Image (tube, helix red, strand yellow):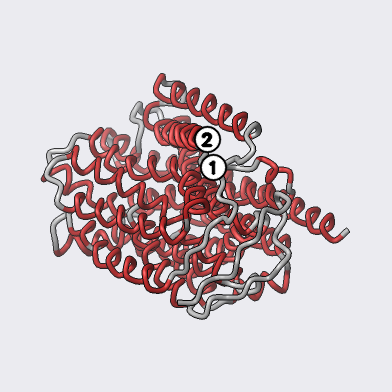
Amino acid sequence: MTTPPQEHAREEPGRAPRTQPQGHPQRWLILGVICLAQLTVVIDNTVLNVAIPSLTREMDAATSDIQWMINAYSLVQSGLLLTAGNAADRYGRKKMLFAGLALFGLGSLVAGLASSTGQLIAARAGMGIGGALLLTTTLAVAMQIFTPEEQPRAIGVWAAVNSLGFAAGPLLGGLMLNHFWWGAIFLINLPVAALGLVAVVTLVPESKNPQGDRPDLLGALLSTIGMASLVFAIISGPGHGWASQRVLASAAVAVAALGAFAYWESRIPYPMLDLHFFRNRRFTGAVAGAVLITFGMTGAMYLLTQHLQFVLGYDALEAGLRTSPLALTFVALNFTGLTAKWTAGMGLPVSIALGMTLTAAGLAAIALLASGGYAGTLLGLLLIGVGCAIASPAMAHAIMSSIPREKAGVGAGINGTLAEFGNGLGVAVLGAVLNARFAALVSVTASSLPAALASAGSAAERERITDAFSAGLESSQLVGAVAVLLGGLVAAVLLRRAERAEAS
């Protein structure tokens, strides 16, 4: 088995290594296998949503049980991404990839055979641990086996798989539930995990930080508590109120833990997260853009699916099919390598500015044209798909290339953490804008569109309530469009300045 070249010793933080590694002879096959494993992890972020009615009926699950079944996976995964990436760098990316597949497969088996809500929640948490290891090590391994010239296309394929997974989750779940019981949506992961384990053992080369930094146990604990608390506060805000005791307490824990984490990392000789990275304009520009593009894209999809179901009357499967052009556009442009060629020709700053401008235009098109039928929505989805296909891989490459190669796992952890943060923030903030505008336009006390429609006394009243919801959707999508556009411009300016500073 061919082994990768020796990794670089520690270089100046925030600068890419000077020597050019050779690509692994089986790199595209390895990428295909690890992306297949990653696909199951991403799908499990959304697949459970369509099984909620079945779980409620067959397991007599309460609303709080359902929420924990969904959130246990995302909370554990988001809280552990940085720690998982650091462990991959320190102990070996191949070892952590193998461990992630094994934990994810075992958790899927327990989830599929669970006989109580407690067992399913625990299994989902275990799957979250495996998912954190997989999401960080797949990208870190790709950075080791591809040459710098090929890395943009490899990252584009990796990002396309993420997009495909989020879109395919509800569709796959709906198809499985039409033919099997709810546990099948988890057991389908087992053959993929088994194939991945065999492929990792036989194909993936081992790589790790040659320095062998000492474990940063306190940093791992603080980062996990801080990120999990932050994501929990964002998830809980829309349902419990932003001023509720639950949300404020979670936010306070997050601020305290992350503040202590930053202080600790600045004081120790071998930090989990080198804070010098944030002095690099290339890194900070990509970070700002990554948060805002996931903010706009995820928030938009969350609101659009409500519009398709509540206003236009589509069921969950039909709504999923009608939002799929976004993911299909993203996948097609990155699988064919077109976005990698465009980015190589335009450069990172222009690519990110163009991509996020197109994404903002798509959000604005949905806001202004969705009420006129599906044609306006389709135009918006295609614009968002093209914009994200250009900007998302470019920003991921900017993050990964601004971090030394021996810290690729940490870079992948940062990239994943930003995506989780942007996802939660987009749903929370744009959802809050929608609800505020909706509540201001209707006189009913119901907190949701279905409840408001149920309380309406006439067809005219129902039409007025639907129009109010559409107005709230328009406002929230426009807020998302402005945020994405500004984020793209800020990211592009910072990246341009970084390039000029490096050139001089």
Q: Which residue type carries mark 1?
A: Arg
Structural distance between the alpha carbons of marks 1 and 2 = 12 Å
Name the residue nearer the viewer: 244 or 461.
Answer: 244
Residue 133 seen in this snapshot: yes
Q: Nearer the viewer, residue 383 or 489?
A: 489
Please name which of the two marks, 1 or 2, marks the residue nearer to the observer.
Answer: 1
The residue most toward the right is 504
Q: Quadrant of the N terminus?
A: bottom left
* Residue 473 in view (yes/no): no
Mark earlier in primary sequence (1, 2): 1
- Secondary structure at numbered mark 1: loop
Q: Where is residue 30 in the image (x, y as percent from the top left)?
A: 44, 73
Q: Going 26% across and 37% down the picture, which residue do you hit?
A: 454
Q: What element carries label 2?
A: helix
Instruction: List x then y, in percent, for residue 208.
Output: 53, 58
The outermost residue toward the top is 245
Residue 321 found in image quarter: bottom left
| Left or right: 122, with 329 as reference point | left
Above or below: residue 504 compared with residue 260: below
- Relative placement, left or right, of 37 versus 431 is left
Q: Residue 219 carries which label?
A: 2
Q: Does residue 184 lie above or below 3 as drawn?
A: above
Q: Please give the label number shown on residue 214.
A: 1
